[in-house]
Image (cartoon, rainbow, N blue to C red):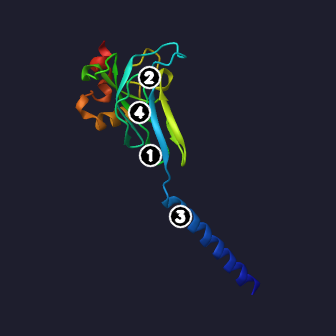
Amino acid sequence: MKTMNYMAMVLLVCTLITTAVSCESEEAGEAVVSIKNDFNNPEMTYQPPWTICESSYLGQEFGPIAIGETSATLTIQPGLGNVLMVAAWDDPDCNPENCLPIASKNEEEVVDGQTRVISINMPNHQGPCPPEGVQPIPEELYEAIRAMWPQYDFLPYDQRTENTQCLE
């Protein structure tokens, strides 16, 4: 009899745990995010003149962001990922010949209930034609940007240093 009560109790506990986990996973949660173009940050030793022409984080497009500006805030599902961008060097009009695909250097994370501004600046970005000794943007991120914004006609990854902006 004690064994049956014990088994029933174990079954009940397992059912409650399973229900709690499945209910929790059905609720995706929300985070409030904006992206700041922080390339003009005076605390950095160098402020590259990148205008962010296109931006996306965790599947949500944040649009263009001028130097020193912050995008509109969007409510998104929490997660972990890189900010993907197209940026123009010294060109606030975002002419394609001045643009390159760039991404945040780190995967950025937001959690349920969080409000966060993700700052993109000199040490927190990576591109296709960095200075000697600096790792280029990973192929997976580069190709995701090419697929997301094909109108910029970026060359395939193995030819990335031949993009017009890399040659200047």
**69 and 79: which is toward the camera:** 69
The circle drawn on residue 135 is none
Is label 4 in contact with label 2 (beta carbons under 8 Å)? no
Residue located beneath label 3 in the image: 23
Residue located beneath label 4 in the image: 71
Q: Secondary structure at mark 4?
A: loop
Foreground disc of the pair 4, 3: 4
Residue located beneath label 1 in the image: 75
Q: Is residue 79 above or below residue 64?
A: below
Is label 2 in contact with label 1 (beta carbons under 8 Å)? no
Is label 4 in contact with label 3 (beta carbons under 8 Å)? no
State the separation of the CA atoms marked 2 and 1: 22 Å
The image shows residue 20 at horizontal and vertical percentages of: 58, 65
What residue is at 37 percent from the left and 31 percent from the top?
85
Q: Earlier in the sequence, mark 2 or mark 1?
A: 2
User: Please, what is the three-letter code of the amino acid marked with disc 4?
Assistant: Ser
Q: Secondary structure at mark 3?
A: helix
Q: Is residue 92 above or below residue 33?
A: above
The image shows residue 52 at horizontal and vertical percentages of: 37, 26
Is label 3 in contact with label 2 (beta carbons under 8 Å)? no
Q: Secondary structure at mark 2?
A: loop
Classify the position of the C terminus by image quarter. Answer: top left
Can residue 81 be spotted in the picture? no
What residue is at 30 percent from the left and 38 percent from the top?
148
Residue located beneath label 2 in the image: 68
Using the rendered view, name the quadrant where residue 150 is placed: top left
Can residue 142 be spotted in the picture? yes
User: Please, what is the three-letter code of the amino acid marked with disc 2?
Assistant: Gly
